[in-house]
């Protein structure tokens, strides 16, 4: 009688490999702020890293192709008056990024495709509504221009970036500091963790907690939570003895296990038992979970660790299956996670991380070993693309939609540069900002693509003219030297 010992999985042999030295980004002064954020955000066009800056907060934005040593005078994105705590790229526009700061504001920036000559100091819009520092940002996965922010005032605000208005404000749901916030796949629910050790599922449009679990992890250290594609919730936290721990929870599982015939419904008592709970080690770093819904693999990166552990989540016990660990010599200070559409499909790359060291950023590539160079349908199902499924008003009215999917068979081609246009309502209906007014021309009248191309052509012509004059001056100097030598 044969007995299967090894679990069958196409991801069982996934391995990680650090990129070569010339593919890293060197000489970057990564921020030293003590905040449990990833400090890094990446999309198929740009890499953004929070950096040290005097007199305020700043982050650097580099084109992915600009590897090697970064010039110390490379332009930064500045504008915050206090350290930047979190950054997040818009999933529907690869040129738009939001930043949250200790100065209580959220700023949204348009990053040009060309390298700017000086620091970017004018944001498209500044969102003011928090009374304490803002440490968490998260864009809506399917609705255009919808951004969530969470601050030290224990308030979650959902903004319409296109108008600068507050769509929803969740004031009375968290009695203490919020540690993490995550949307589900269609953006209808939120999963939050808080310093009061409670894991909550929130319906933001109804303004109510639809399920909660106290002490999902019994330790006092910060807890993180992410939704999986099956609607489960994956969490990381600490035990009472300060051991790091991971858990998998299903709001419907407890009801189904009770043998009820009616379909399970989210309720207050569905979190009594975890689907899976595993202790890991005794390190102090908070585990940051990065979940890939296409492969159902979750990657755990601890700040201060020198390794990345990854697990596959399935419907078979024990539900969370350990795959492997990528280890390196130096600890990580932060981590960026590339969206699926930014990977190289012809190399069977299923994930790419951007590991922050003290003064550099190093790409780490996760690969499934395959002999064929053909497109692997089983590794690359259709994945969320850059097109939104809903407008902000449609989502607010109660509509839900799954992400608009694209195929990676022919590789991903980024769309042309799109400007984020901010439409402001009647100024008499809006409270005037408490800070200094920004330039009207800078915020409401961005340069058109035609004007920008004209300016670039003029700059190119001026450079050519300067080079021609330099050659003429050199020739004249040589002639003068010959004349002087002849007279001697």
Image (spheres, helix red, strand yellow):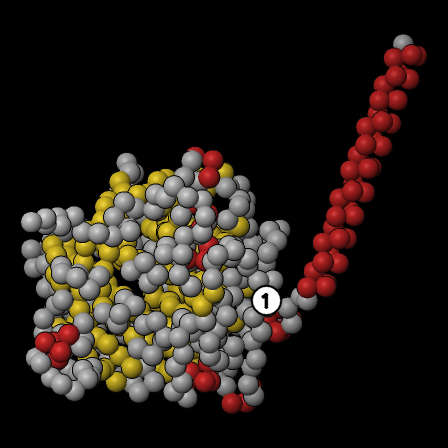
Residue at numbered disc 1: 418
SS type, badge 1:
loop
Residue at the spot x=82%, y=37% of the render? 468
User: Front-most of 131 and 188?
Assistant: 188
Against 30, is 290 above or below? below
In the picture, which quadrant includes the C terminus?
Answer: top right
- In this rendering, position of residue 165 left or right of residue 307: right
Number of labels in the image equals 1
Q: Is residue 373 visible?
A: yes
> At which x and y percent is residue 310?
25, 51
Residue at the spot x=29%, y=60% of the render? 296
Q: Quadrant of residue 190?
A: bottom left
> At which x and y percent is residue 85?
37, 60
- In this rendering, position of residue 22 left or right of residue 455: left
Against 164, is 336 above or below? above
Residue at the spot x=17%, y=69% of the render? 249
User: Front-most of 196 and 20?
Assistant: 20
Q: Is residue 359 visible?
A: no
Residue at the spot x=65%, y=72% of the render? 445
Against 5, is 141 above or below? below
> At which x and y percent is residue 88?
42, 62
């Amino acid at each position: 009688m044969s007995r299967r010992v090894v679990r069958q999985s196409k991801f069982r042999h996934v391995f990680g490999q650090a990129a070569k030295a010339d593919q890293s980004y060197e000489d970057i002064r990564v921020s030293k702020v003590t905040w449990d954020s990833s400090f890094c955000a990446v999309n198929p066009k740009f890499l953004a890293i929070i950096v040290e800056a005097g007199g305020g907060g700043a982050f650097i934005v580099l084109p992915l192709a600009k590897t090697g040593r970064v010039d110390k005078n490379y332009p930064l994105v500045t504008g915050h008056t206090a350290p930047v705590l979190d950054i997040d790229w818009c999933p529907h526009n690869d040129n738009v990024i939001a930043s949250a700061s200790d100065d209580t504001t959220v700023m949204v920036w348009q990053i040009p495709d060309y390298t700017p000559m000086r620091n970017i100091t004018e944001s498209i819009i500044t969102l003011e509504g928090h009374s304490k520092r803002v440490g968490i940002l998260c864009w809506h996965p399917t609705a255009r221009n919808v951004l969530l922010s969470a601050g030290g005032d224990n308030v979650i605000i959902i903004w319409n970036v296109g108008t600068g208005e507050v769509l929803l404000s969740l004031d009375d749901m968290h009695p203490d500091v919020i540690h993490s916030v995550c949307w589900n796949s269609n953006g209808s629910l939120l999963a939050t963790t808080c310093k009061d050790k409670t894991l909550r599922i929130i319906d933001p449009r109804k303004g109510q907690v639809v399920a909660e679990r106290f002490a999902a992890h019994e330790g006092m250290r910060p807890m993180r939570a992410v939704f999986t594609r099956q609607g489960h919730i994956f969490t990381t936290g600490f035990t009472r003895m300060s051991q790091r721990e991971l858990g998998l929870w299903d709001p419907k599982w407890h009801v189904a296990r009770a043998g009820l015939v009616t379909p399970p419904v989210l309720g207050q008592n569905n979190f009594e038992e975890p689907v899976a709970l595993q202790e890991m080690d005794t390190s102090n770093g908070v585990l940051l979970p990065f979940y890939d819904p296409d492969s159902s693999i979750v990657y755990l990166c601890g700040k201060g660790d020198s390794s990345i552990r990854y697990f596959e989540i399935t419907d078979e016990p024990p539900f969370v299956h350990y795959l492997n660990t990528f280890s390196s010599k130096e600890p990580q200070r932060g981590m960026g996670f590339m969206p699926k559409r930014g990977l190289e499909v012809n190399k069977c790359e299923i994930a790419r991380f951007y590991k922050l060291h003290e003064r550099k950023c190093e790409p780490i590539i996760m690969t499934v070993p395959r002999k064929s160079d053909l497109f692997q349908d089983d590794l690359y199902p259709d994945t969320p693309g850059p097109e939104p499924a809903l407008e902000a008003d449609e989502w607010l009215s109660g509509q839900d939609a799954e992400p608009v999917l694209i195929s990676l068979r022919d590789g991903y081609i980024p769309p042309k540069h799109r400007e984020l246009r901010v439409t402001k309502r009647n100024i008499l209906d809006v409270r005037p900002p408490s800070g200094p007014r920004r330039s009207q021309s800078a915020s409401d009248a961005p340069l058109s693509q035609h004007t920008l191309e004209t300016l670039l052509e003029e700059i190119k012509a001026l450079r050519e003219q300067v080079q021609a004059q330099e050659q003429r001056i050199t020739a004249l100097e040589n002639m003068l030297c010959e004349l002087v030598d002849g007279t001697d």
